[in-house]
Amino acid sequence: MRPSLRRTVTGGVLSMTFLGAGLVAAPSASAAAAYNGACGTGYSVVNSAAVGTRGMTYLTYSSATGKNCIVTIRNTAGTGVYIYAGFQLAGQGDTAVDDHGTYTSYAGPVYISGKGACIDWSGAIGPAPEQYVIRYATNCG
């Protein structure tokens, strides 16, 4: 991890699976967490969604590598809470990859080769009850 992009693990690890439709409440544009560049050079944001009122999940892509990357970022860093970022090739649960745990600011980055495929992706932020977002079969190509 690059020193300029820090996160802190403060507790145990929980697990979340792709569960269903996400919450529709969205933070105001000024309050939404900006993409933090955690995926690295060459990755551009290709999709994003609010995680309830607590943050944003960003799906990025690198045309040079053919990989997607996902990061879930809290609107405001603070005491550690459960944060989840994960995805899979659409309809192929055996390809699922994620990062989740108790973090102060974000979960991820996580990478998957997505060239020629659609992506199912999701994010969640605690504390319980977690707010989450999930998108099925997006960003095909």
Image (spheres, rainbow, N blue to C red):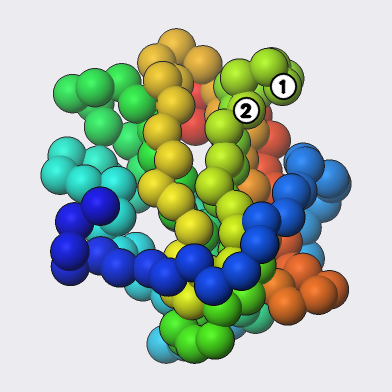
**If the image is split into quadrants, where does the C terminus sit?**
top left
Circle 1 residues within 10 Å: few <14, some 14–19, many ≥20:
few
Mark 1 belongs to which amino acid? Gly
Name the residue: 74% across, 69% down: 131
Q: Quadrant of residue 64?
A: top left
Name the residue: 49% across, 58% down: 107
**Left or right relative to 19: residue 10:** left
Residue 96 - label: 2
Q: Name the foreground residue: 96 vs 134.
A: 96
Q: Are marks 2 and 1 in contact (CB under 8 Å)?
A: yes
Name the residue: 72% across, 55% down: 14
Residue that protrudes farthest toward the front in the picture: 11
Name the residue: 15% across, 44% down: 41
Residue position for label 1: 93
Q: Quadrant of residue 90?
A: top right
**Left or right relative to 57: residue 63:** left
